[in-house]
Image (cartoon, coloured by chain):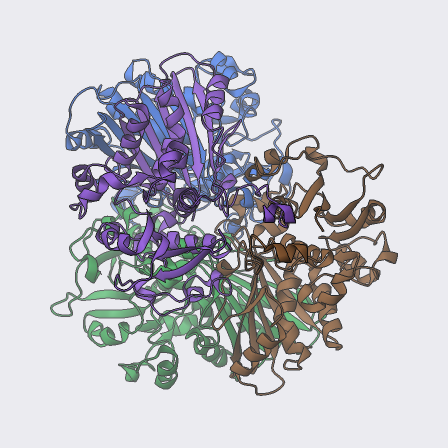
Chain colours: A brown, B green, C blue, D purple
Amino acid sequence: MNSPVSVAVIGASGYSGGELLRLLAVRTDVSVVYATAQEFAGRAVGEVHPDLAGVLDLRFESYTPEGRAPVDVAFLALPPGQAMQLVPQVRRWADRIIDLSGDFRLRSADVYAQYYGHTHAAPELLADAVYGLPEISRDAIRTSRFIANPGCYPTAAVLALAPALQEGLVDPGSLVVNALSGVSGAGRSKAVELSFSEVNENVRAYKVGMHQHTPEIESVLERVTGRSVRVSFVPHLLPITRGIHATVLGELTADVPEGDIRDLYRRFYRTSPFVRIREGLPQLQSVTRTNFCDIGLVVDRRTHRLILLSVIDNLLKGAAGQAVQNMNLLCGFPETRGLPGGRPEPVPLFPTSQEILA
Amino acid sequence: MNSPVSVAVIGASGYSGGELLRLLAVRTDVSVVYATAQEFAGRAVGEVHPDLAGVLDLRFESYTPEGRAPVDVAFLALPPGQAMQLVPQVRRWADRIIDLSGDFRLRSADVYAQYYGHTHAAPELLADAVYGLPEISRDAIRTSRFIANPGCYPTAAVLALAPALQEGLVDPGSLVVNALSGVSGAGRSKAVELSFSEVNENVRAYKVGMHQHTPEIESVLERVTGRSVRVSFVPHLLPITRGIHATVLGELTADVPEGDIRDLYRRFYRTSPFVRIREGLPQLQSVTRTNFCDIGLVVDRRTHRLILLSVIDNLLKGAAGQAVQNMNLLCGFPETRGLPGGRPEPVPLFPTSQEILA
Amino acid sequence: MNSPVSVAVIGASGYSGGELLRLLAVRTDVSVVYATAQEFAGRAVGEVHPDLAGVLDLRFESYTPEGRAPVDVAFLALPPGQAMQLVPQVRRWADRIIDLSGDFRLRSADVYAQYYGHTHAAPELLADAVYGLPEISRDAIRTSRFIANPGCYPTAAVLALAPALQEGLVDPGSLVVNALSGVSGAGRSKAVELSFSEVNENVRAYKVGMHQHTPEIESVLERVTGRSVRVSFVPHLLPITRGIHATVLGELTADVPEGDIRDLYRRFYRTSPFVRIREGLPQLQSVTRTNFCDIGLVVDRRTHRLILLSVIDNLLKGAAGQAVQNMNLLCGFPETRGLPGGRPEPVPLFPTSQEILA
Amino acid sequence: MNSPVSVAVIGASGYSGGELLRLLAVRTDVSVVYATAQEFAGRAVGEVHPDLAGVLDLRFESYTPEGRAPVDVAFLALPPGQAMQLVPQVRRWADRIIDLSGDFRLRSADVYAQYYGHTHAAPELLADAVYGLPEISRDAIRTSRFIANPGCYPTAAVLALAPALQEGLVDPGSLVVNALSGVSGAGRSKAVELSFSEVNENVRAYKVGMHQHTPEIESVLERVTGRSVRVSFVPHLLPITRGIHATVLGELTADVPEGDIRDLYRRFYRTSPFVRIREGLPQLQSVTRTNFCDIGLVVDRRTHRLILLSVIDNLLKGAAGQAVQNMNLLCGFPETRGLPGGRPEPVPLFPTSQEILA
């Protein structure tokens, strides 16, 4: 394969869209041919994302479904409720779709309506989408044409819980997920409550008991474990720009030494290059600006609970990084290519002629 | 009473000590006669706490027990393990003692040794100390001569849990306390891991399952409720200077409407001027630089849990503010006097002559 | 005077308005009888400024000029261009007016139009307003009925420069003011560029060479010195909530030792309780949440320049604190009353009966 | 050239050292064979820089000069005053040296002693070092064996001033540099004044008129322009982790339109891939985590000054990024290789067999 993969980014002026452009711009095996942003149509990418000036020479366009040249992959990085309107059209000109929104992550249109507050516009497509968490369903992703890219909180929570639940180590009805998010998770939007003066030196929980990521966490874990899962999910907004820190508690079903559980986790993720099981407690800074998910764990003997700590960068492993990881799988590239934290590929920069000619 | 109360602050160069000086300096009914700081002995208070230049004209001294003139109240704001060395001496020259450290908050010297990592130096005094949480034991405080001022995390957690536990609304064996703290809680100390570059844009849990505030929370709640209490306590360090945000979950023992629980909380705290039961979710900014504790609550029907959110300023309601609130009670002053967030006292600035002459 | 001064706050939902309410709520000699906020009319103050719940029991109203009961003092804390519309009406029901906006700080309607970008609506009132910087014109303020409360940048810059310029120590044509501002200076408004993610870990200069505080700084200094003043003013937005740090440079006209200049500054401000001339370099934290202006100075022999560093809290000394300082002067109260950083008044809390009966 | 360049990093546990490892770890044309850190000898790199766990498998060693295998390039990232002790030894086993400290940036041992406060230990080597600012002396760097990597402030200030001074547009005796720095510039050190609580919501100037970067800025500009240069340099510490924002003012020598000056700057830097002349005012976020220097400029007609705004990431273009840029030049790699912000190299990932066989 000598010609680069052609990609479109629909909704490229927000934080996830910008991060996608940042990751894709420096690749020689990918070519961004189309980036849309209604509000900034006609403007250079480098005006809207000033760090990309001189890095990506492209102008934002308005989205139009008509007369589009086909692309290999279309990323959709739109506000909630818009992707479900566009996917049927985008399918006509994009060979594969990776949707970063929550529109296609749930299988039930009823649950969607309950948590998102509006009816689903394309319920018939819900079953088509593969939930794009490579560590859980790498094989299904490789052969899919339509990926629902996971939410930031669910990525952190599911990666923390999947091994313990699958192994039956914790009671799936006992789970508590306390999660802390940076502000970029709320998107590049204007709102008094997101302004610096309101967020700085402040912390607040929000949408307690009603956040739309609750059914996403539960349903994905139910598919992993085959059992009913119940989670008390409490998200909080923190004065940081990037990152998710999830603190997850579950009641242990047996007395298992902490070291054994850590070993189990390492085995579970031994083929997953972006998950690191840390010896001690993880911290956000270790994963910020990378595609890693770091997980630490503590057995609290007194209360007979397993306490899991899980950290990701919400814009990378929690959004654009994971989307590129999915693209790599879809396109047959090495899974870690072009992702911060990925090791250098074991390919010599200058291959020998035999390798080329082979 | 016309002459001001004389007070000493032992350990006045740290954040809690500085906050005490800040609160006491502007009072006309209190006179700070003695402030110690080994490292800064001989230096003006305004050099060490530069905002106090021109506000409090005093020089730090070294602490010496010999030949001290008696004072009405001595505050001890020392690093862990020092107060238990000094209290026996301080009792000789101070009529009342308010200790801001953890040295006298537990009743058991064994539990102290287990969580603090060293033997208690004055176990015979443990029973003398009254745990100084006015909202829980106001009457005992008024008549005490020795106050163990509560920890910041326990203040937030106990105020959140006491009404529900006392009323039997939540299972005392099911509790989870996820708490988030500003950096000033770690004291004014030099450490790479507290430096700005390490804390900014970072979050990390610490001392999971082994924090010394765990037995403090449990034992205080046990005294309140008369039942055995078990808490999974997970503290986290956040990139904010001041504040504690506690997210507390417990399993409901009965189906009680959210509004009824809120009413119960309001009744419980109706005589406590510094506790506000909010209609929605509280946020840290509402209490920063005040002595308030704001509490919000949500009934999560799906998981049958009560979720409590509780916020305080760790240096005020979590330390120096609470210490002054205790001093007000000890000295017969109005409880809210001189405390940010306290309402103006219903005393005319210029009393009528009858009031004076009476 | 036994009954409290009655005040109105027009535009009380923003940061300056909220800070005014915070300062006024705890005073027993002032009564807030009327607070307006178009967007929040009918809502309790404690919903909009949640820290004031339980501190100030008042509901926001819409502003209406008709049938208003007279008040002693009206504060106007409105966005640019609104006060000049209202002042003629407010004069009918308010004995004295303190306007926190820039509408009446310049004497020339032409310069106003040039820098504010619209015509002045009440040019005939420009000459009536007294520029309310107490350290410069305390006597004029005391007898005035209409105060133009200074801007935050001009407060920091003018207090730094006035003594040196008045004494002829620096060339008034050589001045450079580099100023750094917290985000609350931009008001409580929704804008992508003020959102946390855009401001955090960022710095940017803005309105370079065209900021409306440039002519304010120059014209006030010209009135002080009687000479023509030229300032290159470069404001920057920082990731802090509160505070102004001004770095001011001017060419020295003579070789004067640093200590002599510091003495001169101390003499200049010897009757000004809120200005502190520091021995070393000032820092913002020393004045945040206080009404102080701290000034430091360095003589740079190599470049023959005087370098002045000046810090204030933009919402207190740069806005609401200064407005209350002005109110204190207008009403005959002690200048420092009710202002953080003010020393306790040398009045016994319980006056003797002689004082009362006198 | 098929085998990778071998490099050593002496002093790799600090922020600049860590950033070097981060940049070098993902390159296939470079191999880090030796990384030292006295305090962490024997510890895995991923324990000290936790984001590098799983990215760079290497253990820190103690530095010993004896019996070292030769390396192609040695980076020295040590605290001030240590490199001048080591360079004579390192020369014996390293073919080329890039020193990130200030030890070899000045040509005069006297000026060094005056600003650094101690005598220079290897004055005879001062003339050997090439000042490694590629935009100014790319050709000299290519052929050098010993690079003095520029300071963070001088990089920002010199890149802003060089074109205007070289062209004679501003008076070299009139310069003011106000610079703002993130905290990582102070290194990974423990100090109360660098702790989060002391830096957050704070700003302070430091070393006013005596900072060691003053003679570095002046002497480099003097070499560029051949004229005597005088700078008032005022550095400030900000509550951000990374970044330098320099605001530079100089008196214009002639009336030149702003657009002409911008054109001049673009011509000056047309072969420099990491300098971007922005149309409007630059902001720090556009360059953070990149190797770019963004420059904006305003002609202030009123005061007849040119105002330049210049931003860099202090750990990249201001330290480790620039060091790698220098290594690229020394080793004959493309200048931008492996540097964030560098465009993808116009080399196909899979070269055709002809290219290989050629």
Q: Is residue A129 left or right of residue A150?
A: right
Q: Residue at x 51, y 23 (%)?
A: C91
Q: Is residue A91 left or right of residue A291?
A: right
Q: Residue at x 48, y 15 (%)?
A: C125
Query: As displayed, is residue B76 above or below residue D74?
Result: below
Q: Quadrant of the N terminus of chain B?
A: bottom left
Q: Residue at x 38, y 71 (%)?
A: B141
Nearer to the camera, A341 or A43: A341
The residue sitting at the front extreme is D358
Q: How many marks?
A: 0
Nearer to the camera, C53 or B334: C53
In the image, residue C324 lies at what x, y percent?
A: 41, 35
Q: Is residue B77 left or right of residue A124?
A: left
The residue sitting at the bottom extreme is A255
Nearer to the camera, C116 or A187: A187
Residue B305 falls in image quadrant? bottom right
In the image, residue D300 lies at what x, y percent?
A: 43, 19
Residue B331 falls in image quadrant? bottom left
The residue sitting at the left extreme is B67
In the image, residue B210 lies at what x, y percent?
A: 44, 77
Q: Quadrant of the C terminus of chain B?
A: bottom left
Query: In the rendered image, is residue B310 in sight?
Result: yes
In the image, residue D178 lies at what x, y percent?
A: 35, 33
Query: As displayed, is residue C24 above or below residue A214?
Result: above
Query: In the rendered image, is residue C144 in sight?
Result: no
